[in-house]
Amino acid sequence: MTDYEIEVQPDIELQPDVADTVPVAAKMTLMHQGVSPPASLTILLTGDAALQQLNRDFMGYDIPTDVLSFPAGETMPGMAEAGMDTYLGDLAISVARAEEQAAAAGHSLADELQLLTVHGVLHLLGHDHAGAEEKAAMWAAQAAVLRQLNVEIVIGE
């Protein structure tokens, strides 16, 4: 049985035990949402400047943010032959923003990165939080995955 393929691309220095939590959170989210392997995605761990540029170029907002999701939308040519039937897309996470948010909320950087990873993967899978019902469903899914990861974070606005 083929597993999920989660490629993490850190372009900043992170402690290995912190960085290792990111693919675990992504896989747990895929399993929770019933995504059957094979499935793959890429996660970029970077800084505020890169997220601000991506946010400006792709979303039209010239401000830094914590996580951006870029769904693939379709299987890419050659993916099935490579054993990856479903390429879900890409996430970009600002580690600097995650550090600030973790400090403000009183939890670890690893926990914040797991929250942002779960949030981003849920977006790749089609979840949204624009409306009240969508938001309630997405927040419930986040909370359930975080419980499975033994991450105790209160998810706010």
Image (cartoon, rainbow, N blue to C red):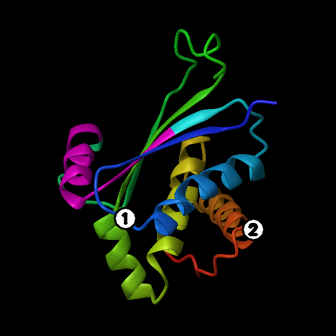
Q: Residue furthest front?
A: 16
Identify the secondary structure beneath mark 2. Answer: helix
Query: What residue is shown at x 26% (from left), y 48% (from top)?
Result: 55
Q: Is residue 52 magenta?
A: yes
- The label on residue 14 is 1
User: How many neighbours does mark 1 have within 10 angstroms: few (below 14), some (14-19), or many (20 or more)?
Assistant: few
Read off the residue under disc 2: 148
Q: Quadrant of residue 143?
A: bottom right
Name the residue furthest right: 1
Q: Which residues are magenta?
A: 42-58
Residue 13: percent from left, percent from top: 30, 61
Label 2 amino acid? Gln
Q: Nearer the viewer, residue 44 or 120?
A: 44
Q: Residue shown at 19%/47% (left/top)?
A: 53
Give the numbered dot on residue 57. Answer: none
Kind of element beneath mark 1:
loop
Q: Is residue 4 left or right of residue 119?
A: right
Q: Which kind of residue does numbered mark 1 sit on?
A: Leu
In reply to whether residue 11 is colored magenta, the answer given is no
Mark 1 and mark 2: span between their CA atoms?
24 Å
Side of 86 relative to 11 (left or right): right
